Image (cartoon, rainbow, N blue to C red):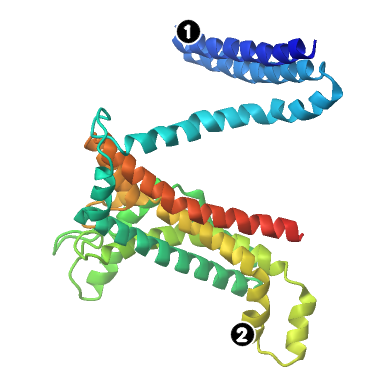
Amino acid sequence: MLLGRTAVAVFVPGVAFLVLWRGFLFLRDVEAPGLITVLLSILWGVGGIAMLFWVANWLVEKLPTNWVRRLQPFVFVGPALAILAWFLAIPTLRTLIASFQNTTSSKFVGLNNYQFAFTDRTMLTTFRNNLLWVVFATLFSVGLGLMIAALADRSRFERTAKALVFLPMAISFVGAGVIWNFVYEARTAGERQIGLLNALWVGGGGEPQAWTALNQPWNNFFLILIVIWLQTGFAMVLLSAAIKGVPAELVEAARVDGASELTTFRRVVIPSIWPTIITVGTTVVIFSLKIFDVVWVMTGGQFGTDVIATQFFRQFFIANDNGRGSAIAIVLLVAVIPVMVYNLRQLRQRESFR
């Protein structure tokens, strides 16, 4: 009897899921006005998912109590795990397999693609650029965010200042690239400069410069500046919240003992918010390792500005080299995973401490 109930509890939700899936395929292929299709898709999706959960939960509750305790969490977590497996775990495994195969994924070539990734001159430049991104984007984003958070904390204009600094976070990376393209815009000598930086440079007596093209490898820093502009507000908000969470008694005790404001900040505030600094820093490191949009919009990876993500895009989608593209993607994944694991451990330690 128990076996039959368990089979029904697994079989019926499976059938319901297949019906839901077939409904989406039908809505995709049916010829109807776009608005009607959208409304039906929303109705079918929301109603179907709700019905799927209700049916699965109802069937599991028919089982004995000990089995309900075991299976009921999976009624709600199971679909999410299935989606993660289908859209993340399986594609990652397929990418790993393709990284050991040739261009068309028809022949096993061993470590040849990884040999290319770690010996090709362009790839070595790419790794150097990513290292610059990780070091300088993280250092200045977190540093400036911490400085602004500390200085604005006592200002009468705290809200206005923080809002202005945080404002770039509302802009997408692509939008930021377009904006800064105008800032770095260069015209030949004698033409009116519409780029802000060149207008100032020429006004000071200099010649117009193609800031993101000619000044290698310094042009990478002009691109890194864009992400610093975007991420400083993110760092500032989190660090400001952490600073406000420092017990006032500790700060007052340091002042009573004769410590200066700088010493109090360095010896009391920073150690108190150090876990937050680490969390923010590792988050910006992950952003920097995966950076793509800004580089592609600004330079397309030319002039020695390629990063790992742009090289992956170039090899996989432009050169149609599945093997090399997959190998570069795996290299990027391996680079990001340790930072993510460290970040999760820090968060777990903070939660357990509380």
Figure quadrant of the N terminus: top right
Q: Residue furthest left?
A: 189
91 up-or-down from 257: above or below: above
Q: Left or right? Give the position of 298 relative to 229.
A: left
Crowdedness of circle 2 by 10 Å Cα count: few (<14), some, many (20+)? few
Q: Residue furthest bottom?
A: 258
Helix, strand, or loop for circle 2? helix
Amino acid type, callout 2 = Leu
Amino acid type, callout 1 = Ala
Helix, strand, or loop for circle 1? loop
Q: Nearer the viewer, mark 2 or mark 1?
A: 2
- Position of residue 18 measured from the top left corner of the image (x, y, whole percent): 57, 12
Q: Left or right? Give the position of 89 relative to 132.
A: right
Q: Nearer the viewer, residue 215 or 187?
A: 215
Crowdedness of circle 1 by 10 Å Cα count: few (<14), some, many (20+)? few
Answer with the quarter of the image where residue 162 lies: bottom right
Residue marked by disc 2: 262
Disc ID at residue 41: none
What residue is rendered at 79% in x and 14% in y?
2
Disc ID at residue 32: 1
What residue is rendered at 30% in x and 40% in y?
325
- Position of residue 20 measured from the top left corner of the image (x, y, whole percent): 59, 13
Q: Left or right? Give the position of 234 relative to 287.
A: right
Q: Nearer the viewer, residue 74 or 42?
A: 74
Q: Nearer the viewer, residue 5 or 21?
A: 5
Answer with the quarter of the image where residue 152 lies: bottom right
Residue 83 visible in the current orientation: yes
Distance (Cα) linking label 2 and label 1: 67 Å
Q: Name the N-terminal-most of marks 2 and 1.
A: 1
Q: Residue furthest right?
A: 65
Q: Nearer the viewer, residue 36 or 57?
A: 57
